[in-house]
Image (cartoon, helix red, strand yellow):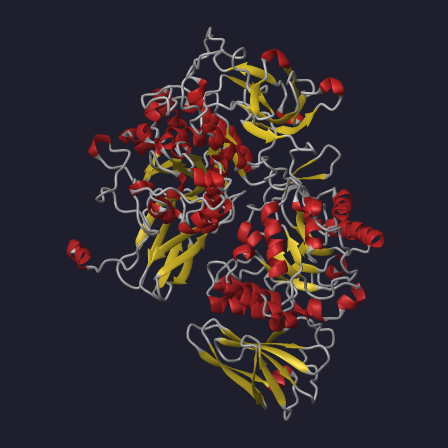
């Protein structure tokens, strides 16, 4: 009977992509993880309910496409059940879902290269026993002409799986570690993907954190196949207009992106691992392309970097780390140098290095592992060196640094400690004295170059035994200099490595040297390494007049700092805060992007000025106790960002916490307030958010606030720059209401806002209960603006409909809460900007209020399901009104003049602030049909003047 009943059920109206399934790992938002999403398809406008553990998230499918998307917070859960139900048919369910770290492994055959062909394959596969929390997802090979919402089912015609143990297609589903071992999938899984992620878990001590490994790779494929059409156009522009050659099937442009990347677009990840480039190295540029100034390096660099940018944009989670395996040799030792010079590998390696942090002045969250010394033949030939083990370890070191911001030496306890990088070149200078003609000095950053030495790639076999081959460094010294048109190898005798000064001097050139290159052949016999045996990346550098390689940042060339107004922030601060959208996934490139966007997208004109970085910009304290910004994500430092904001007429803020640790476990301000206030003053800071979090705290909660107030008063006296103080929290007028405004401008009245209707409503109603603290005239006595803070805006983020976002904006504006945009401002839609930058609405937020009452309040809630909110305006001639409909269907909402303080018979002109147009005059009251969860917002003006409505 039960069976019969089940068969009778109509199919579910919901489709979830294949990656939504049992044992799935969702990227957690701890540390740098940013946000995770679930996407699905339903009928157009269908009501969908996502049950995520205890949480229920309602969402309405798009009216045209039926697509829906919710943001989820998996945290550290390990056994969640997720149920997605539509209006008909059974729900789609995923069980045993965990929050953890997800890695997306892509590229060509060396990424496909199975674990069973790597060194010590059996022993390596057996290490999985120590990582029972790993989950494997192998993606079926497939290509498509247009971007796909989902992968095709296992076994679909024309698609193929790289793992079919005992005839079972293992693709497009999650396997637990046990299942991967029992079925044999682990032997077929990408050696580099598995060993890199395993080494990350080991080196960074991820403990039992769940980890998802997604393999989406295809042998012999070219970078252009993995790129969206938009990314291709952008790349072609950067590459002197050179378009990819025409290919077919899986090598056609965009086809792998469409079938094997786009279905994962909304899957949040910790990092992507990329091992590709061999197929592009073979590319011979046409003479026409060369005539346009094109080179293979420029081509691959432009295409790879645009691919990275577009993968990041499309995920919408903020930046994730992008880690590249730089190409190892394809030739074998002893191959004639003529052949070695034409493989294209050297050019591709340089391009790959350009995508890495600390290279060419870039500061991106990315890295490239150098593998020039790891050539060799496997069962798949010399194009597929078998020592994936060491390659993976190096990529893991890079990833721990870039994706987890670990500094210095990586690994602890039983895990091996190593620097994450080989030597980093910092400058090249030419000898200037007559004696030193033909002499070149290469300098390396000290910390990267301890133990600098030349290394014979053949000195040891891979198993550690000595190898008698001594090719290096006699015939194959790694440096060459350019004199005139010729490249000349610098002999060993003329290559002087000095570990003490972290330099290499190249001598003996017969004339003026114009460029230097290193490791410029496919198979490199001799490398320059540091104490950790990690090699320097290949390079070609012209010697320019000013020798420093460190590219000057935009800040360095920006106009001088402009000191912005001496005001004491008498109106609610308006600007941006990184937390809601980026979480910890924030860096200086993004912050500069936000500054540029606000300065040019209409927000600045509408009053937005602060660009504030929330938690995670800080990593440690220096020996002198000053705070250390994350050197990977903010290598130019915070002053440079403040200067940049100021150069655009904007202001700059950061976050700290009053305890010894911030909420993301970064160093807090406890007992360092004076030194931090001085540092912030020196940077030119305009805004400090002082959170309430963990670690050691002062016995009384306001010590931190008092200390900062003191430090900032000194700064103000010295520089005339006022620093806004935003604190967490004051939630009870009787507890802190009497004095809070003396030590802060704005304080959180309620917990963290989420991008959901219930959270937005909860926050604004709780905030309303605090209105008396702001409206009792204290601000004047305190000599600085005072505002209740209902938390940052979620406008532009997944989770709220357009109408709900308008409602948030209307109520936050009316309530004089700080307006801090918390979305991806760089890529904000027209709709998002239309809400945020409606200057008629923001003017209500900034209005000082009638009789000093800056915070508008709820004035009438007598009719069930609807509310009237009002703010009497400065000057006594106007009132701003928000009519709010809490219900699920449209309803009329009426504001009575009595609640607004407008005289009964007064003639009132009406301005519709969302429509930005005048509405008919009104008398006695104003009624408007208001959409479900929506608002109507009006400014009412009367020449008769208003009286205090007593709220
Ligand atoms: C929370 C705070 C959030 C955000 C976060 C960063 O306590 O309320 O707004 O700053 O910490 O860790």
- In the rendered structure, the answer to whether residue 142 lies left or right of residue 610 reads left
Residue 230, compared with residue 412, is above or below; it is below
Residue 297, compared with residue 932, is above or below; it is above
Q: Is residue 733 visible?
A: no
Residue beneath the point at 68% across and 50% down: 644
Residue beneath the point at 28% across and 29% down: 184
Q: Residue furthest right?
A: 717
Q: Quadrant of the C terminus?
A: bottom right
How many marks do you count on the picture?
0
Q: Position of residue 90 (x, y in %)?
A: 27, 57
Q: Position of residue 724 (x, y in %)?
A: 72, 57
Q: Position of residue 307 (x, y in %)?
A: 45, 44
Residue 634, compared with residue 623, is above or below; it is below
Q: Residue furthest bottom?
A: 905
Residue beneath the point at 70% across and 67% down: 774
Residue beneath the point at 68% across and 79% down: 950
Quarter of image, res 249: top left
């Amino acid at each position: 009977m039960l069976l019969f009943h089940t068969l009778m059920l109509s199919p579910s109206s919901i489709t979830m992509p294949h990656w939504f399934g049992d044992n799935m790992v969702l990227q957690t938002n701890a540390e740098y993880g940013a946000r995770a999403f679930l996407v699905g398809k339903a009928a157009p406008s269908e009501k969908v309910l996502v049950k995520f553990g205890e949480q229920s998230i309602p969402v309405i499918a798009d009216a045209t496409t039926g697509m829906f998307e919710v943001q989820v917070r998996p945290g550290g859960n390990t056994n969640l059940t997720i149920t997605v139900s539509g209006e008909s048919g059974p729900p789609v369910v995923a069980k045993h879902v965990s929050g953890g770290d997800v890695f997306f492994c892509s590229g060509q055959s060396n990424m496909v290269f199975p674990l069973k062909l790597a060194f010590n394959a059996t022993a390596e596969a057996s290490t999985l026993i120590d990582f029972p929390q790993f989950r494997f997802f192998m993606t079926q090979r497939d290509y498509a002409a247009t971007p796909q919402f989902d992968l095709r089912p296992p076994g679909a015609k024309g698609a193929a799986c790289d793992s079919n143990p005992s005839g079972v297609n293992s693709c497009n589903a999650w396997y637990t570690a046990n299942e991967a071992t029992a079925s044999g999938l682990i032997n077929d899984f990408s050696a580099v993907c598995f060993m890199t992620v395993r080494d990350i878990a080991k080196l960074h001590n991820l403990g039992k954190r769940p980890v998802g490994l997604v393999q989406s790779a295809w042998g012999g494929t070219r970078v252009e196949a993995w790129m969206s059409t938009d990314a291709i156009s952008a790349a072609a522009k950067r590459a002197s207009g050179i378009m990819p050659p025409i290919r077919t099937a899986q090598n056609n442009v965009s086809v792998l992106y469409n079938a094997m990347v786009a279905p994962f677009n909304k899957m949040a990840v910790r990092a992507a691992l990329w091992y590709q480039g061999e197929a592009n190295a073979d590319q011979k540029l046409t003479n026409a392309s060369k005539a346009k100034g094109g080179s293979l390096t420029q081509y691959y660099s432009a295409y790879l970097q645009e691919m990275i940018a577009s993968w990041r944009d499309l995920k919408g989670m903020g930046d994730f780390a992008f880690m590249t395996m730089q190409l190892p040799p394809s030739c074998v030792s002893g191959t004639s140098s003529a052949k070695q010079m034409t493989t294209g590998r050297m050019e591709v390696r340089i391009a790959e290095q350009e995508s890495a942090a600390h290279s060419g002045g870039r500061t991106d969250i990315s890295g490239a592992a150098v593998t020039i010394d790891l050539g060799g033949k496997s069962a798949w030939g010399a194009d597929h060196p078998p020592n994936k083990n060491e390659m993976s370890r190096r990529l893991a070191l890079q990833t721990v640094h870039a994706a987890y911001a670990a500094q210095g030496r990586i690994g602890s306890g039983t895990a091996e400690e190593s620097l994450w990088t080989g030597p980093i070149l910092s400058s090249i200078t030419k000898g200037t004295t007559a004696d030193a003609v033909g002499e070149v000095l290469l300098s390396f950053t000290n910390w990267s170059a301890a133990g600098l030495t030349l290394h014979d790639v053949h000195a040891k076999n891979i198993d550690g035994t000595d190898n008698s081959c001594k090719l290096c460094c006699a015939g194959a010294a790694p440096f060459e200099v350019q004199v005139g048109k010729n490249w000349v190898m610098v002999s060993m005798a003329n290559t002087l490595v000095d570990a003490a000064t972290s330099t290499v001097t190249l001598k003996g050139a017969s004339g003026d040297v114009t460029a230097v290159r290193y490791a410029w052949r496919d198979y490199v016999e001799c490398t320059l390494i540091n104490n950790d045996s990690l090699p320097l990346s290949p390079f070609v550098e012209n010697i320019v007049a000013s020798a420093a390689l460190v590219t000057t940042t935009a800040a360095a060339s920006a106009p001088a700092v402009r000191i912005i107004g001496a005001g004491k922030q008498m109106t609610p601060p308006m600007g941006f805060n990184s937390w809601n959208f980026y979480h910890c996934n924030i860096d200086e490139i993004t912050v500069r992007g936000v500054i540029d966007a606000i300065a040019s997208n209409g927000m600045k004109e509408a009053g937005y000025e602060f660009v504030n970085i929330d938690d995670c910009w800080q990593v440690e304290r220096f020996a002198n106790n000053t705070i250390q910004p994350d050197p990977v994500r903010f290598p130019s430092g915070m002053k440079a960002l403040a200067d940049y904001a100021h150069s655009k007429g904007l202001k700059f803020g950061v976050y700290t916490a009053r305890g010894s640790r911030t909420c993301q476990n970064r160093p807090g301000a406890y007992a360092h307030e004076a030194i931090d206030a001085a540092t912030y003053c020196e940077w030119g800071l305009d805004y400090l958010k002082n959170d309430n979090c963990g670690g050691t705290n002062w016995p009384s909660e306001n010590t931190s606030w008092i200390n900062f107030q003191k430090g900032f008063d000194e700064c103000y006296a010295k520089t005339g720059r006022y620093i806004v103080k935003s604190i967490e929290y004051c939630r009870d007028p009787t507890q802190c209401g009497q004095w809070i405004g003396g030590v802060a401008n704005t304080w959180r009245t309620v917990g963290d806002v989420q991008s959901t209707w219930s959270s937005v409503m909860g926050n604004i109603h709780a905030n309303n209960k605090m209105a008396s603290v702001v409206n009792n005239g204290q601000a004047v006595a305190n000599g600085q603006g005072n505002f209740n803070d209902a938390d940052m805006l979620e406008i532009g983020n997944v989770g709220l409909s357009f109408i709900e976002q308008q409602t948030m904006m209307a109520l936050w504006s009316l309530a004089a809460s700080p307006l801090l945009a918390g979305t991806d401002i760089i890529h904000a839609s027209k709709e998002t900007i239309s809400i945020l930058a409606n200057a008629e609405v923001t003017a209500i937020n900034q209005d000082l209020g009638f009789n000093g009452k800056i915070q508008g309040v709820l004035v009438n809630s007598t009719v069930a399901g609807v509310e009237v909110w009002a703010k009497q305006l400065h000057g006594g001639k106007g009132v701003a009104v928000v009519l709010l409909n809490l219900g699920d269907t449209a309803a009329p909402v009426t504001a009575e003049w009595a609640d607004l303080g407008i005289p009964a018979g007064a003639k009132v002109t009406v301005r519709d602030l969302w429509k930005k147009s005048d509405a008919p005059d009104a008398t006695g009251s104003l009624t408007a049909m208001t959409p479900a969860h929506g608002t109507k917002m009006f400014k009412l003006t009367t020449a008769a003047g208003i009286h205090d409505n007593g709220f």
